Amino acid sequence: MGNGRLTGKHAVITGGGAGIGREAALLFAREGAAVAVADIDAKAAAATAAAIAAAGGKSAHFELQSQTTRLVDTRSKTWANGGLTLSAALFQGTWPGP
């Protein structure tokens, strides 16, 4: 467990299924935040949320492409106060430019 620096806070972390996003989600949870883990890889997001729950934390997971509306609704209705957002998602693919 951490020092409780984020106790009472709620965090939405995009890209939370792997890499920096996953580590940030685990850290935020260790510090007491309830964490919504969002990723385009639903299984990876679920695995991060399960790791948080197994350590005694509070979490939910969302698949970014199909559940973005649900993520925003949950964030605004359930976790209206004390919120943090970290976008650790990395765009993968080609960008055609402006």
Image (cartoon, grey):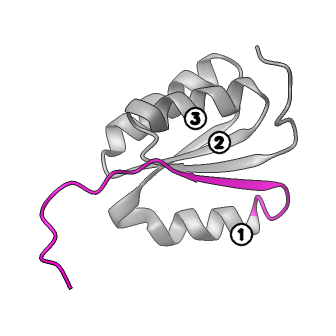
User: Looking at the rendered structure, which numbered label has been put on residue 25?
Assistant: 3
Establish if 92 lies above or below 7.
Answer: below
Specify the amino acid type for callout 1: Ser
Image coordinates of residue 51 in percent, x first then y, are 53, 22
Residue found at the far front of this picture: 98
Look at the image and tell me in which quarter the N terminus lies: top right
Image coordinates of residue 84 in percent, x first then y, are 71, 53
Sequence-first disc among 2 and 3 = 3
Per the image, label 3 sits on a secondary structure element best described as: helix
User: Looking at the rendered structure, which numbered label has been put on residue 76?
Assistant: 1
Specify the amino acid type for callout 2: Val
Establish if 50 lies above or below 93.
Answer: above
The stretch of residues the image draws in magenta is 78-98
Establish if 55 lies above or below 64.
Answer: above
Give the Cα separation between the discs numbered 2 and 3.
Answer: 7 Å
Give the Cα separation between the discs numbered 3 and 1.
Answer: 19 Å
Look at the image and tell me in which quarter the C terminus lies: bottom left
User: Looking at the rendered structure, which numbered label has been put on residue 57?
Assistant: none
The residue to which callout 2 is attached is 35
Q: Residue at x 14, y 58 (%)?
A: 93
Image coordinates of residue 54 in percent, x first then y, are 60, 18
